[in-house]
Amino acid sequence: QVRLVEFGGGLVQAGGSLRLSCVDSGRTFSRNAMGWFRQAPGKEREFVAAISWSRGFTAYADSVKGRFTISRDNAKNTVYLQMDSLKPEDTAVYYCAARLSASTWANSKDYPYWGQGTQVTVSS
């Protein structure tokens, strides 16, 4: 059973940095990939970044390329999202997600497991 818990959200000024963490406490040994999505008020949930668990392949949304970095620690069952050069438009609830089989990176419907979300607010 996959159980995802996010940490690290908060309030930061534009240009600042935050690091989000997501721990899978469910001892999932067949995890294929984990990703981060976000949802701003009044908008649909959108893909941010994803990483394959075995080989570490990564994918990013164009809006965060060069500013965000996704990484994982296999031993700790944890995925991270380092967010630098934050902008007010990055303000959203950020969700960690996991999938057990290969599929498209950016389709939220391909991720059956989700965390509760963590709020990130970037002030101008």
Image: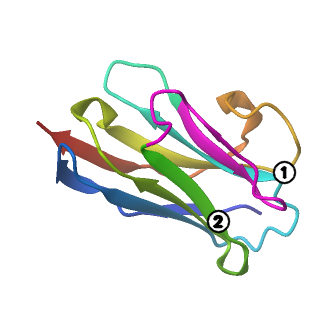
Quarter of the picture containing the C terminus is top left
Task: Give, as a three-letter code, the residue at label 1.
Answer: Leu
Mark 1 residue element: loop
Q: Position of residue 42 (x, y in %)?
A: 33, 18
Q: Nearer the viewer, residue 70 or 65?
A: 65
Crowd tier of the residue under label 1, counting other residues whose Cα lies within 10 Å: few below 14, some 14–19, many 20 or above: some
x, y percent for residue 57? 76, 50
Label 1 vs label 2, nearer the camera: 2
Element carrying mark 2: strand
Question: Rounded to the nearest whole Å, what is the CA distance between mark 1 and mark 2?
Answer: 16 Å
Vertical order, 30 against 39 (above or below): below
Can you identify the residue that label 2 sits on?
72
* Magenta-colored span: 47-66
Residue beneath the point at 26% across and 36% down: 87
Instruction: Give x and y (percent) for residue 108.
Output: 65, 31
Going 58% across and 42% down the picture, which residue do you hit? 49
Residue 26 counted in the magenta span: no
Q: Amino acid at mark 2?
A: Arg
The residue positioned farthest toward the left in the image shown: 124
Q: How many marks?
A: 2
Q: In the image as oriented, which residue stretches furthest toward the front?
A: 66
Say which residue label 1 marks.
Answer: 100
Q: Quadrant of residue 54?
A: bottom right
